[in-house]
Amino acid sequence: MPRTPAHRSRVGSAALAAAAALLLGLAPAPAAQAGADGEKAAPTLHELADRTGRYFGSAVDNPELADTEYANLLGSEFGQTTAGNSMKWDATEPRRGEFDFTQGDEIVNYAQSKGLSVRGHTLLWHQQLPDWLTSGNWTADELRSLLKNHITNVVTHYKGKVVHWDVANEIMNEDGTYRENIFYKTIGPSYVADALRWARAADPDVKLYLNDYNVEAVGAKSDAYYTLIKRLKADGVPVDGFGMQAHLALQNGFPNQLRQNIQRFADLGIDVAITELDIRMILPSDTAKLARQADWYGQVTRACLAVERCVGITTWGYSDRHSWIPGTFPGEGAALPWDENLRHKPAYDAISAALSAAAKKEDRQH
Ligand code: XIL
């Protein structure tokens, strides 16, 4: 991707002031106060990422937009967003052939009003499918035509409004075999290439992604995607990117060889994105866990920054006030870089430091 940092000239007064403060033995002013005395406010995560040619984003679910304080910070700190739920099949085609884009449009309109780009998520998944689809007893031909119609309508509606589509989400098992979702069971593995082709036919410009979790490390599951994407490319099937969700958990260990893994996908000639980053822990949180979480956030950020074709990072929400983790993993939480009161956690500082180092390096090279 082109490296044209938009904010190169901003290298900054804020950074210089912070360095001077350190030299003088002063604590740097907190972000909230910067600017009060005419200093430039600390750069946002997206401003720093943008200087390296990348975006920094956060997912958002529609009800969260009503939390004004939360929505305002989303709009000012981030450069990209992903609809947490409202572009999924159950939301966009709740009845066969009847499309409802109200909720997805709300996210797009909000994003446009704040200057955020949008990743589309997701055209096909084994979860959050409407009952009419899962309860039908479809032949392969019938399901293929339902899938084609769904993809064509949704991609056409959001043409020019989303920059990426997660075309297929979570289609592999941990051992690298295909997940036996309704599409695989009814149609067989060819549904993946077909889905990508239908998406491309509906929008020639949007970047088409495969997306999954537990693919951050080198292992059976990421190997399966590596082999699949290599074959799709060889067959001329349109696939532009690989999304690593990165729902990490402190108790599971840091994904081994993350940077090398990102690099090998990039070497296939596709983009890579960190699409749903959060780092949960067993509650209660404590200083040691938060420090380890911060270290991991820094490591993930640096791994992406080290690979030219890693185009951006999206966290799955940004504050512990609104996170899917406690509801899905009982007893776990505290997974995001801002706390419930929208205050920075150590993780925020680690991300900011990693981005800042890369932004300064980029500035020097131009
Ligand atoms: C989650 C949403 O955040 C929840 O609100 C919803 O109840 C379930 O789905 N992987 C994905 C996302 O690809 O779509 C999931 O989002 C989180 C895991």
Image: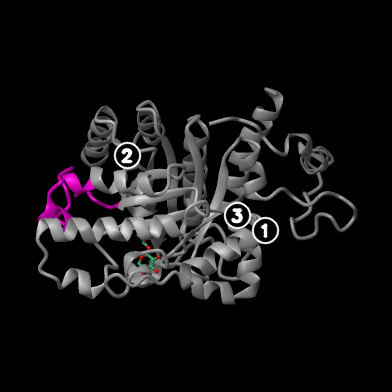
Question: Where ligand 1 lies, by quadrant?
Answer: bottom left
Q: Mark 2 points at which residue?
A: 217
Instruction: Tell whether label 3 touches label 1 (CB within 8 Å).
Output: no
Is 187 in front, or is 198?
198
The amino acid type of the residue labelled 3 equals: Leu
Give amino acid for label 2: Ala
The percent coordinates of residue 281 (x first, y second) are 40, 59
The residue positioned 47% from the left and 53% from the top of the image is 159
Callout in the foreground (1, 2)? 1
Residue extent of the magenta highlight: 169-192
**Which mark sits nearer the N-terminus, 1 or 3?**
1
Label 2 or label 3, whichever lies nearer to me, is: 3
Circle 3 packing at 10 Å, graded few (<14), some (14-19), many (20+), is: many
Front residue of 246/46: it is: 46
Find the distance from the CA under tag 1 to the CA under tag 2: 32 Å
State the residue position of label 3.
116
Residue 43, above or below 326 = above
Q: What element carries label 3?
A: loop
Q: How is the model colour-coded? A: one colour
The answer to whether any part of residue 358 appears in the image is yes
Callout 1–callout 2 Cβ contact below 8 Å: no
Secondary structure beneath label 1? helix
Q: How far apart are marks 1 and 3 (CA)?
A: 9 Å
Report if the CB atoms under discs 2 and 3 are less than 8 Å apart: no
